Image: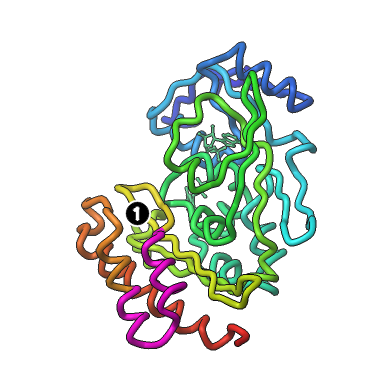
């Protein structure tokens, strides 16, 4: 039981449940339907301090070794959800431009040391840079519920209500085999970027172009893939005129939220420009 008063800050009494295995974590999730899962705690603890949530129990998965892996398996990387943001940046920045951009543009090193990949994905929000980067690496999630273990693409996960679940694994294309890039425009007042975008390029078995485009605020505040822009690249190529069209397609397709930090028209416009520029830069690196 944790009960604290620090100066004027009064924290509620919270029981921290500490499962020793994933099965135990799932059982605790079923027995305690109102207890949030806590991994790095960046979001959960700030939500408790701000009184947005008032849980009496938390299920702490941060010590479960089964959720800590980061291993290559063929063309994929399989990551446990409690892998930290800094670990991903450090491991893949030398081989992936998107991961280097992610590390270089991170707002706070102390947060990167705490925040986890699974915590980011579960938030399903445009604040999470890794969602975009995982989308352009075709990430697939393994979700564990009380009654099943199932796989779902990250793209579908962002659109569905998955019920009570634990993200057990995130499998994504090996970043060293993908040409990818990530950029964000942020204001100091908020860690949620005004706009961010990620792209990747590759070649299919027949030599044709493969493209992925993801932006923040694709639908309201939720990030997502922009399929029409991907098809425009795969069908029309990477020349200057077609990239102009791809940028306009992004602008037309996404439906961002209008809020105090940026109007929707600005987000649409800047997302289109970011995608066009990143594709233009990656084009030069892509083998013919
Ligand atoms: C000051 C500040 C700066 C930031 N800067 C950046 C930045 O530059 N780039 C960026 O990408 N993000 C940034 N963030 C956001 C940060 O990345 C997220 O808050 C963080 O990723 C959440 O991860 P966590 O492990 O701390 O999640 P937690 O707070 O532990 O959990 C977050 C949510 O995910 C759920 N959850 C956690 N793990 C799982 C799981 N395995 N299965 C199912 N549900 C789960 C929890 O129940 C909760 O709902 C910043 C945040 C702050 C406060």
Q: Is residue 52 left or right of residue 96?
A: left
Question: In the displayed structure, does residue 101 sit left or right of residue 70?
Answer: left
Whether 209 is among the magenta residues is no
The spot of residue 89 in percent (x, y) is 64, 63
Above or below for 112 versus 22 = below
Residue drawn at point x = 75 percent, y = 44 percent: 68
Q: Position of residue 278 (x, y in %)?
A: 45, 77
> Measuring 58% from the left and 85% from the top, which residue is drawn there?
285
* Residue 255 or residue 106, whichever sits in front: 255
Q: Magenta residues: mostly which secondary structure?
A: helix
- Which residues fall within the magenta stretch? 226-246
Residue drawn 78% across and 26% down?
21
Of residue 190 and residue 23, the one placed in the foreground of this image is 23
Mark 1, Cα crowd under 10 Å, few <14 / some 14-19 / many 20+, is: many
Residue 243 shown in magenta: yes
Image point (42%, 65%), residue name: 197
Q: Is residue 47 above or below residue 80?
A: above
Q: How is the image coloured?
A: rainbow
> Residue 223: image x %, image y %?
41, 52
Q: Which residue is mark 1?
A: 218
């Amino acid at each position: 039981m944790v009960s604290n008063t620090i100066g004027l800050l009064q924290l509620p009494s919270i029981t921290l449940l500490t499962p020793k295995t994933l099965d135990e974590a799932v059982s605790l999730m079923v027995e305690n339907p109102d207890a949030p899962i806590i991994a790095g705690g960046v979001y959960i603890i700030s939500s408790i301090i701000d009184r947005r949530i008032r849980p009496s129990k938390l299920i702490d998965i941060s010590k479960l070794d089964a959720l800590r892996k980061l291993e290559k398996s063929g063309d994929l990387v399989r990551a446990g959800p409690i892998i930290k943001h800094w670990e991903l940046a450090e491991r893949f920045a030398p081989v992936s431009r998107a991961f280097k951009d992610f590390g270089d543009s991170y707002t706070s090193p102390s947060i990167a040391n705490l925040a986890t990949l699974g915590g980011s994905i579960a938030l399903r929000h445009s604040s999470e840079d890794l969602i975009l980067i995982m989308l352009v690496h075709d990430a697939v999630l393994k979700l564990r519920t009380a009654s099943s273990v199932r796989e779902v693409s990250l793209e579908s996960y962002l659109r569905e209500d998955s019920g009570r679940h634990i993200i057990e694994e995130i499998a994504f294309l090996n970043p060293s085999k993908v040409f990818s890039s990530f950029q964000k425009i942020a204001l100091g007042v908020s860690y949620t970027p005004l706009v961010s975008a990620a792209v990747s390029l590759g070649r299919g078995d027949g030599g044709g172009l493969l493209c992925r485009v993801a932006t923040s605020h694709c639908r309201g505040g939720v990030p997502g893939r922009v399929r029409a822009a991907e098809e425009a690249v795969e069908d029309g190529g990477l020349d200057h005129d077609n990239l102009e069209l791809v940028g306009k397609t992004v602008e037309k397709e996404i439906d961002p939220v209008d809020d105090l930090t940026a109007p929707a028209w600005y987000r649409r416009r800047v997302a289109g420009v970011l995608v066009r520029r990143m594709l233009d830069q990656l084009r030069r690196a892509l083998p013919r």
